[in-house]
Image (tube, rainbow, N blue to C red):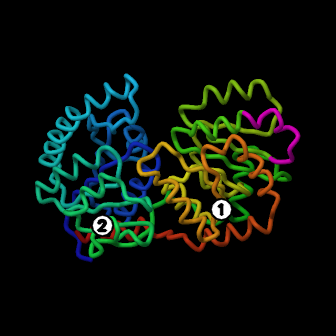
Amino acid sequence: MKQSRNRNIIISGGGTGGHVFPALSIAHAIRERDPKAKILFVGALGKMEMEKVPAAGYPIKGLPIGGFQRGFSRRALVSNFKLPFQLLVSILKSFQILRRFRPHAAVGVGGYASGPLLWAAARKKTPYLLQEQNSFAGKTNKKLAAQAAHICVAYPGMERFFPASKIVLTGNPIRENIGPATQKGVKEGLEYFRLNPEQKTILVIGGSLGAGTLNRCLEAYLPRAKEQTVQVLWQCGRNGIGRAQEALRQYPDVPVYVHEFIERMDLAFAVADLVVSRAGAGTISELCAAGKACIFVPSPNVAEDHQTHNAMALVKEKAGCLVPDNKAMEVLMDKALELVFDNEKLQILSSNVLQLSRPHAAKDIATLVLEL
């Protein structure tokens, strides 16, 4: 491919790890293909991308944008009242960013910041690509689809949301080093997390911010954890770390190991016999690449219930199990303890989920971006 001297590319979106980590994977793949490319991220002020993106070595600009808050609490009403003003300021700032950076192409990965930036990009005739991670398309991407050059998706059947001529089935970009466990990876993971190699391991992950339901299930499990011949690696998230540590102080000798955030998720997947997780699209793609048996507990607090749609796409292929959020306190840990010792079912789930993996998504998307 013929390369221009200095290609400027904007990557917009974020809000959660499910948006940020795929965006970083795309950036790394672009840099790999074209080391001279200049990449600028545009995110939402106060969200995790403002910390994670600079840590990965990329510059970022923040927009004062948030999402629509459901419910009628005073906080939600005040937040929603501010939203039109935040949107206007974010659009004006997006035009300013585009004028100064002069991108040749833009990428939207979903999340608050992608809407204003790509709306402005369309008016500046800057070509852009959308990356839709979920099996049920988000409202922002649906609104931006008409003027997108390509729409990269992770699930078949997305023609019900987007123009078929623009859809490219790439899968979701995942973090580097995530793949089926190797003997070396398992050994390194056991040492890294200081786990017992003689015991089964359940990995519980609720996303970068944590999941209240999963955290409460683990807290309720602690009184009987010492009786079990299984250890639990628990990512409780920023919102749950204080309460989780307080709960564990009451049960100091149980084999439950809590982390606010797990940086080496490749090693966590390597040591896990079973994963209990929310059903965010990015997490599912990583589980597919790692070939891990999983029980999904879809979040009920997301637009269009898209996590249930994501999980059901795997359940239908016998590549995962599902426990509804409102049943989790009653049945989740019992189901996990039963499944983690059912080696035959674990193997079936692992084999089936691995077949759904698309490990080269970031490279395929980077190719499309550079061709723009």
> 353 left or right of 168?
right
In reply to whether residue 300 is colored magenta, the answer given is: no
The residue wearing badge 1 is 292
Please indicate whether residue 124 sits to the left or right of residue 255 in the image: left
Residue 18 or residue 265, whichever sits in front = 18
Q: Which residues are magenta?
A: 220-230
Residue sitting at x 66%, y 30%: 244
Which of the two discs, 2 and 1, labels the residue nearer the N terminus?
A: 2
Nearer to us in this view, 28 or 84: 84
Query: What residue occupies the far right of the structure in this picture?
Result: 227
In the visual, does 280 lie left or right of 42? right
Q: As shown in the figure, which amino acid type bears the numbered disc 1?
A: Lys
Identify the residue at horizontal 58%, vertical 44% (top origin). 206
- Element type at marker 1? loop
Q: Position of residue 333 (x, y in %)?
A: 74, 46
Q: CA distance from mark 2 to mark 1?
A: 31 Å
Q: Please tell me whether mark 2 sits on a helix, a strand or a loop.
A: loop
| Label total for image | 2
